[in-house]
Amino acid sequence: MAQLGLVEEFLLLTLEDEGGEFDSIPDTQLNCGLAGAVLMDLALKGRIDSDLHQLWVSDAAPTGAKVPDAVLAEIVKEPVPLDARGWISRFAKDASFIRDGALASLINQGVLRQEDRTYMWVMKGRRYPTSGGTERQEAKRRILTLLFNDELPDPADICLVALADACGVFERILSPSSLREVRPRIAQLVRMDLIGGIIAQTAQTMNVELKQAERRTVLAGLAGNVVEWYDFGVYGFFAAAIGSQFFPSDNPSTSLLASFSVFAVGFFARPLGGVMFGHIGDRMGRRFAVIASVVLMVVPTFLMGLLPTYAQIGVAAPIILILLRLAQGLAVGGEYTTSMVLLVEEAQPKRRGRVGSFAPFGAFGGLLLGSAIGATITSILSPEMSAVWGWRIAFILGMVIGIIVYFIRRRLPPEDVVLDAEAARKAPIVEAFQTQWRTILRVIGLNLVNAIGFYLCFVYATTWLNMVAGIPQAEALALNSVALFMLMVMTPLSGILSDHIGRRPMLLIGTAGMAIFAWPLFWLMSLGTVPSILAGQLGFVLFLSCFTGASPAFMVEAFPKHVRCSGLSVGYNLALTIFGGTVPVVAVLLISETENVLSPAFYLAAAGVISFFMASIRGPHEKANS
């Protein structure tokens, strides 16, 4: 057996003593540690040197080890010298190739064996195979022994101590009292290696900065979705009032149908918005795309709050309303999927489900905010005042929220977007249709249950409860707010669970539940009592949250990076346009034609069956954890 490199031994420090998971330290720390370990390994082998200002190649000869040689080649071809911080920053962003290479080496050398998603020791007692009749003591035992005596350490072990200290390994393998006892010894050992100390300190700083960057990204993605979906959803909550103001008719149903048709118009603009912002996201960067989408959403929403009615300017009123709704559709078409990509890409691999779930979390938060403000307005004002001018307050407030979000997103760090040979590449949308059309179709089918389920159960439901069960609008909005709040809470929990058991099981549970329980839950809601309505909506919350928590990471991972925004935006927005935006119209027509108030449930059940089938198919780019 060849002697293990520093990367392999550092990785073994994070493995459970009996084997199993590499989850003893956070991903941010692990990735920085792996990047630091490979640089330290090259320094120990005399290939690189460093000072406080830059790192350079002192010997470009290959080491014979796959991962260190790949890193060395990157350093050699870099025209502008970087310091240790710059290289750790670069390699930590995609440390999976370092980790995978180290795991492959450990398996090939007979140290570990893979069992499903876990890695077990081949030999009992965490032992290494012998090499030339000599057995080398396992890394964790060596450095723990080193901490509790005054022996002269091996240079590689000094590096391991520095890395373990920088990445918080000792906090997890030593008791607090033991750690306090050996802290002076750790500091002494770290000071023995200048290069190792620089790299370890850089890794420690990067750990903190990566966590802060992830938090900023989550906040920006979440806040943007709040304002986008507040603005977009508030129209649905005030559809009846808007219908009477802009589409006056002797038949209230006709006005309502016309108003919901304009609601659907915003959805028909979503695919075009997906194409436009998908192109921007793939070519100019995710950051630029999400800032532009917020601006495009906020301005039309504010203008809708000031728009004169049909009685004041005649037919121009509904025409302008339709144009403003189209602008909102363009914005939402680019916002949601691009922010989803931004969140998942910036998250560590083991946290993608959790972080990606903040995209729908923010969307539900925006709809919840709109629902809550709608309930407040309708409860404070009389029905006549709410219908005449009260609904405008909700639209004008969107401008205030949007300005705050704009400045939050301006703080997102710049990103490296332009790829090699960028000018020679096709337009992202063209390449997406040529190479990813199967995945696009799969995303459309997968999102049928999401599109129909959400807009049927949490947007149209307020109108349906008023029509079927005679529930006052204010009470229906209040109950809907409770359900949306629970959906918002459950979605991140589902995302976290998907990181542990996989995306696919969560999607299958959610889609199957919607298919089986759509009719019983709608029947329960039709009883018209507060407990029955809440029970029905919370049932939908349970199943839909399984989908919304797991699907962002699942869909983002399904596309290659260079066409990810374009492919995902088109697939997702086509599903939401064709099936989500038309939900209120289809539901009204189904009830009218069948004279069965529960007929929309069968529409949802059919969507659940199709989405279940799509979730069960494994795509070509699908990750193992999905």
Image (cartoon, helix red, strand yellow):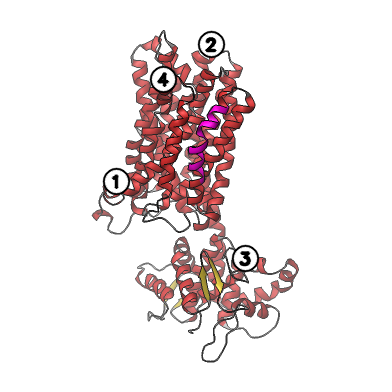
Tell me which residue sits at (41%, 79%) in the image. Answer: 58
The residue where tag 1 is placed is 429
Q: Amino acid at mark 1?
A: Ile
Distance in Å between CA atoms under marks 3 and 4: 58 Å
Instruction: State the residue in front, 253 or 9.
Output: 253
Tag on residue 172? Answer: none
Does the stretch in magenta take in 520? yes
Callout 2: SS: helix
Front: mark 4 or 1: 4
Residue 340's place in the image compared with 306, above or below, is below
Q: Amino acid at mark 3?
A: Gly
Crowding at mark 1 (Cα within 10 Å: few <14, some 14-19, many 20+): many
Q: Earlier in the sequence, mark 3 or mark 4?
A: 3
Tell me which residue sits at (55%, 80%) in the image. Answer: 156
Crowding at mark 2 (Cα within 10 Å: few <14, some 14-19, many 20+): few
Residue 476's place in the image compared with 535, above or below, is above
Q: Earlier in the sequence, mark 1 or mark 3?
A: 3
Specify the segment rendered in magenta. Answer: 509-524
Q: Earlier in the sequence, mark 4 or mark 1?
A: 4
The residue where tag 4 is placed is 259
Across and down, in percent, residue 556 comes to 42, 50
Q: Earlier in the sequence, mark 2 or mark 1?
A: 2
The residue where tag 2 is placed is 384
Distance in Å between CA atoms under marks 2 and 1: 48 Å
Callout 3: SS: loop
The residue where tag 3 is placed is 168
Does the stretch in magenta take in 251? no
